Amino acid sequence: MKKISNFYYLLLLYLISSSGCYGQYSISGDLGADYKNKKIYLSLLQYDNLTTMRKDQVLFSSETDSAGYFKFNGKLLSEEDKIYRIHTNLSENSLGFDFAYTPEVKNFENFIFSNTDTIVFKKSGGVWFLNTKNTNPIDKEWKVYKKVERELTNQLVTIKNTEVRKQSVEKTLKELKQYSIENKVHPLPTLLVINGFTESVLKKDYEANANFYINLYERLLRVYGKNSYTLNYENQLSRFAITPTKENLVYHRRLNYFSFFIILILLGSTIYLMLRIKKLKKTTASLASINLTQQEQKVAELILEEMSNKEIATKLFISLSTVKTHVRNLYSKFEVNNRADFAEKMKNQPGY
């Protein structure tokens, strides 16, 4: 019985500790005792604004204590791996945010993080946020990938010839893409490193090998769904795929208008012909249903030969009044009032 109660006691402790630790993040650091009450900012970044400093990026702010120590913790960050920045101004008198990244001075650090991670920043000499320990595995991938990027791009600094430098930049991009493929780098670090190149270089490479970029988009989509990363990258790819000049836009717009006008004319002509054919079929069917006597048939044929009533009477050896009777009957059956209309309708009869 005692063993059972101990078991439930341990289980209760485990549940309490688990519920308290779930979804907890911790961001802390040390700027040194000389920097007490210094404002520290935590920002959420988009993949294409790693070097921007704006107040609308800030999520939280804190202040260092009397020993220069600061900390952010809680449960309010995203469970997804996203890009964050820790930052402090060089001077508290700055109206906005300042930005420094030199071997001697560095007042920010970008990192990948989630709601369950822990990261610690330490001061090294006069440089803040330099030595870090981050539990996020995607951030570790990014740090290694950035090191490879620096090793490749450092070689570009010594190249003075513009054409050779351009070719070297394109080669560097291809090598970084190949590294991502061979090492199966997470799509977010891949996006961050690849996006360090200018859009003109990326567009040219996209035109030569779109598969890599489309595959990267599909991987981002699988990991993040339709979030800001995938939507912004989708817009970027659309610019690579379709970049028409203003003249082309005007030309295509006029071509569309002309095509629409032609379609309207053809559609109107088709409708008109269909109505004419329908009317003709209706008239033909109506005429075909008219039954004429043998004598009416003869009178009708002579009317078509433009004979007068008297000539018809002579031709058929009948009286003039009989001819007039046959003509009245023909007008009635064909629903006409004169010889011209009668002749027009008789032409639509089969055999005429």
Image: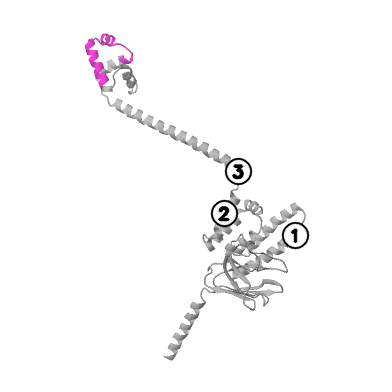
Quadrant in which the C terminus appears: top left
Number of the label disc, if any, that sits on residue 235: 2
Crowd rating for badge 3 (residues with CA inside 10 Å; few <14, some 14–19, many 20+)? few
Quarter of the view holding residue 70: bottom right
Q: Residue at x 27, y 19 (%)?
A: 331
Q: Is there CB contact under 8 Å for labels 2 and 3? A: no
Residue 318 lies within the magenta run = yes
Provide residue 165's location: percent of width, then percent of height: 74, 55
Q: Earlier in the sequence, mark 2 or mark 3?
A: 2
Provide residue 213's location: percent of width, then percent of height: 60, 56
Provide residue 97's location: percent of width, then percent of height: 64, 64
In depth, the one of 349 and 250 nearer the eye is 250
In the picture shown, does residue 189 fall above or below 244? below
Point out the stretch of residues depicted in magenta: 303-332
- Label 1 sits on what residue type? Val
- Label 3 sits on what residue type? Lys
Q: Name the residue tied to disc 3.
A: 246
In depth, the one of 162 and 46 nearer the eye is 46
Provide residue 111's location: percent of width, then percent of height: 61, 68
Q: Secondary structure at mark 1?
A: loop
Q: Name the residue tied to disc 1.
A: 157
Inter-mark Cα distance, 2 to 3: 19 Å
Residue 1 lies within the magenta run = no
Inter-mark Cα distance, 3 to 1: 36 Å
Crowd rating for badge 2 (residues with CA inside 10 Å; few <14, some 14–19, many 20+)? few
Secondary structure of the magenta portion, mostly? Answer: helix
- Label 2 sits on what residue type? Asn
Q: Nearer the viewer, mark 2 or mark 3?
A: 3
Quadrant in which the N terminus appears: bottom left
Crowd rating for badge 1 (residues with CA inside 10 Å; few <14, some 14–19, many 20+)? few
Q: Nearer the viewer, mark 3 or mark 1?
A: 3
Q: Residue at x 60, y 53 (%)?
A: 210
